[in-house]
Image (cartoon, rainbow, N blue to C red):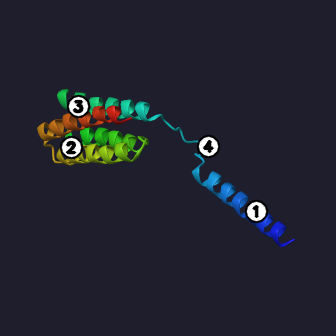
Amino acid sequence: MKILKKVLLSLLIAASMGAVSTSAVAADAGRIVYAPADAIDMTLDKIKIAIDAIANGSEGAAVAALIKDALDSTKEINANDKVDVARSKASSKLKNARTHAKENALQEAEQELKAAQKAFSDLKGLL
């Protein structure tokens, strides 16, 4: 009888842990989850839009908003720890570009954007 209680208690604990962990990792119903390569492409597209905006003579505030959009899209890049570390470093380049854009230093912002573009392109090799 003691063994049966231990087995049933073990099964109950295992089942409750499985139920809790399943609900914790479930994605939100309204949230779109992107594959890592697709998320990188989406980020690269948004960086290109910001670079094109600088080339077309957009103001710093408008460019900063476009860079913010690119920064937000980097959060969708989820693969492994190596990719996450590299993504974080590449994101810092975008943050620097945004700071330059806010200061209307668009030439520096463009250089940072191009560095970020290369860094995000390199992420695909880590997948």
Q: Mark 2 to mark 4: distance in Å?
A: 34 Å
Q: Which residue is drawn at 35% across and 40% down?
A: 69
Q: What element carries label 2?
A: helix
Q: How crowded is mark 2: few (under 14 residues within 10 Å), some or many (20 or more)?
A: many
Whichever of callouts 3 and 2 sits on the residue coming sooner in the sequence is 3
Q: Is mark 1 on a helix, strand or loop?
A: helix
Name the mark on residue 29.
4
Q: How many labels does the image show?
A: 4
Q: Are marks 4 and 3 in contact (CB under 8 Å)?
A: no
| Residue linked to disc 3 | 51
Q: Give the amino acid type for the residue marked by disc 1 in the picture.
A: Leu
Q: Residue 70: where, in percent of width, then height?
A: 33, 39
Q: Residue 80: where, in percent of width, then height?
A: 41, 44
> Position of 95 compared to 3: left or right?
left
Q: Mark 1 to mark 2: distance in Å?
A: 53 Å
Whichever of callouts 1 and 3 sits on the residue coming sooner in the sequence is 1
| In this rendering, the label closer to the viewer, 1 or 4 | 1
| In this rendering, the label closer to the viewer, 4 or 3 | 4
Q: Mark 3 to mark 2: distance in Å?
A: 10 Å
Q: Do the residues labelled 2 and 4 touch (CB within 8 Å)?
A: no
| In this rendering, the label closer to the viewer, 1 or 3 | 1
| Residue linked to disc 1 | 12
